[in-house]
Image (cartoon, rainbow, N blue to C red):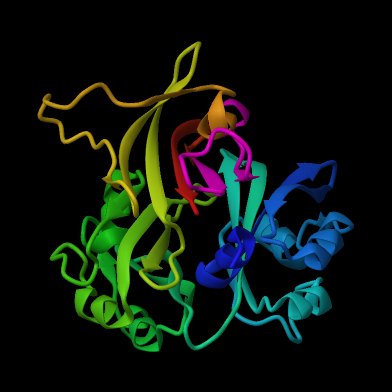
Amino acid sequence: MDTVAQAATDTFIQVCEVWVPEGDRLVLAGGNYNGLAAFEETSRKTSFAKSEGLPGKAWDEARPVVLKGFDGSYFQRIEAAKEAGLTSAVAVPVFAGATLKAVLVVLCGDDEARVGVIEVWTDDRNGMLMLDDGYFGAAEEFEFVSQHTHFPKGQGLPGAVWAAQAPILMRDLGSGYKFIRASAAGKAGLTTGLGLPVATPGKHPCVLTLLSARGTPIARRFEIWNVRAARDPRAFLGDGICEREGPLWRDDGDGTRDEAPTATAWKGVVGQVLGSGLPVVAQGGSGLPADYTSFVGLPVYRGEALTHIVAWYN
């Protein structure tokens, strides 16, 4: 089986797109369609006004939006998505202060073997995070547990991200004591969790979590880069895990590690995110680690300041 078919079949996320404002509409800036040429062609001919389609709705509501099914919905590319085997999507707006920078859209297929989780957690106004919405694939028991779990600040992956106001990687979800839903995660085959704060113009916190399973991973490599504001902006690898290489460099604060890997603006795929301040989706080409063919980089803002970059590879 070739690389493109392998990626399209075995990963939880099948398509990633970046939509950016151009005047009063969102236009496609880039994407990885994993060989789904007809859906890509339809997307390139499409643009969205505010509140229109899934990207426009995320822009209008200024929060991540989950769409678990397309039939009868506001999704505008229904026929093309159906032909491509795509059945659900999540749109993540990227705001710097009150300014929309871009919308990242990920699209998934739905079958009995596809396990993975994308969750959106928001404040319930009582000092707890509750599940606002999510897409769980075949992990139905884990979905039920999540719907009935609330997190105070500092507890579990969503609560830890809320407290730190920074992205966090968690390993061994099925056995880790820090992951509150470990038993259900273990039964679902979930292994690695990435949580990140989503900056919105509103005052209420929002946390996005990506939970990856062994059989149909969201990604085979995750990285978290810390951005340091300066005249010459740089990003330093703070944490990462790779299916092939194991743990990547991690700052444990004990002073015994080698100097952290560094990214500079516009150099390499992480540097493209750093330089532009926008999500970047790349497929093939140079700048990717050995044996990886796709990259998604998502900037994380605190107010108007870029503070982190989260990246995943397949």
The magenta stretch is 273-299
Q: Residue at x 39, y 43 (%)?
A: 223
Q: Does the magenta-highlighted stretch encompass residue 274?
A: yes
Name the foreground residue: 201 vs 110.
Answer: 110
Residue 66 placed where, x, y %?
58, 71
Q: Residue at x 76, y 86 (%)?
A: 72
Name the foreground residue: 35 vs 39.
Answer: 35
Q: Residue furthest front?
A: 1
Q: Quadrant of residue 284?
A: top right
Looking at the picture, does residue 184 appear above or below residue 246?
below
Residue 179 placed where, x, y %?
21, 66
Q: Residue furthest right?
A: 45
Residue 137 placed where, x, y %?
49, 80
Looking at the picture, does residue 44 appear above or below residue 190?
above
Q: Quadrant of residue 96?
A: top right
Q: Is residue 18 left or right of residue 135?
A: right
Q: Residue at x 85, y 60 (%)?
A: 41
Q: Is residue 1 left or right of residue 124?
A: right
Dividing the image into 4 quarters, which one contains the N terminus?
A: bottom right
Name the foreground residue: 117 vs 132.
Answer: 117
Q: Does the magenta-highlighted stretch encompass residue 223?
A: no
Q: Is residue 274 visible?
A: no
Residue 53 placed where, x, y %?
77, 66
Q: Is residue 113 visible?
A: yes
